Amino acid sequence: MLAFHGFGQVGKDFEAFENTLGQQFTIYSFDLFHHGQTTYDGKPITKEELKEWIESFLKGKEVSQFSLIAFSLGGRIAFTLMELFEDRVEYAFLLAPDGMKINLAYRFVANTQLGAWVYKALANNPGLFFGPLKLFKASGIIKDKLYQFFINQMRTSKKRLMVYEVWVTFREIIPNLKNVQRIVNEKKVNFHLILGEKDLVIRVAFSKKLMRCIKDKNVLHVINSGHYMFTPEIGIYISKLVK
């Protein structure tokens, strides 16, 4: 099983599933670029490059069929790998995945020079970001947990720079949801979309576009969780989905 994750403890997140999924799969956990000990120049990677890297890894491990598990930003990688390796993926467990809905702010910052300038201005003058954020929290526009998530991701200049670098690096890794729907409907992949009913980052409502044309609505699992899903209980839940 290939495991991908976004912002988190990095390298340790999937250890929570070791006692459950580790009995059913051999898990290879990948740090995305700009996470853990990885270094990268920030040049946007393409789907073709992603395919080459994964193909090389699979060949080295002598793996033909494989499964995917991904969280948050890693979900965008997993959706894309479903498209690139649709005849080789057995299971795909996507936990609060990014990629179901790409917001305009992301496209503006990651794809335009003006967006990059605006973001860097905010990054260098964090008061311009945190001031309105505190106001939104005080007025109830955003809830405390979402506020804390933003604060944690943007607290230091290093973190703010990493967010920008990640956005640019993965800007071309945008899944084609029509392809994903086709793959799921043709049952080429045993697919499970797992969302937290209390998640304020990747909301259940974000899945509407994807789920609209998926015939089997049972692939969507809404569980008693917030955004963070690396707990032994969720590992047990996922293990029960393996036939």
Image (cartoon, rainbow, N blue to C red):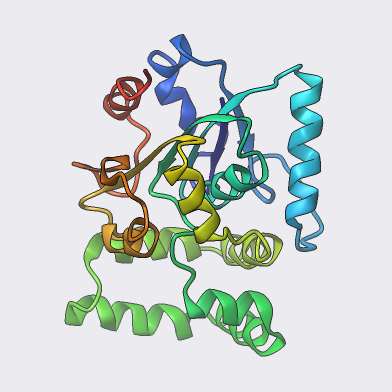
Answer above or below: position of 170 versus 217: below
| Viewer-proximal residue among 49 and 90 | 90
Check the image and name the residue furthest to the front. Answer: 186
User: Which of the image's four quarters has the C terminus?
Assistant: top left
| Viewer-proximal residue among 138 and 167 | 167
Residue 154 horizontal/vertical position (percent): 49, 65
**Which residue is at 37% across, 65% downward?**
209
Q: How many numbered marks have been drawn onto this rendered protein structure?
A: 0
Would you say residue 148 is visible in this rendering? Answer: no
Check the image and name the residue furthest to the bottom. Answer: 114
Residue 227 horizontal/vertical position (percent): 33, 49
* 190 relative position to 27: left or right: left
Check the image and name the residue furthest to the top. Answer: 23
**Which residue is at 67% across, 45% downward?**
84
**Which residue is at 34% across, 27% downward?**
238
Residue 221 horizontal/vertical position (percent): 26, 41
**Which residue is at 67% across, 86% downward?**
117
Residue 115 horizontal/vertical position (percent): 62, 85
| Viewer-proximal residue among 126 and 96 | 96
Answer above or below: position of 55 versus 109: above
| Viewer-proximal residue among 62 and 198 | 62
User: Which of the image's four quarters has the N terminus?
Assistant: top right
Would you say residue 143 is visible in this rendering? Answer: yes
Answer above or below: position of 4 versus 140: above
Q: Quadrant of residue 87?
A: top right
Q: Quadrant of residue 138?
A: bottom left
Answer above or below: position of 144 versus 118: above
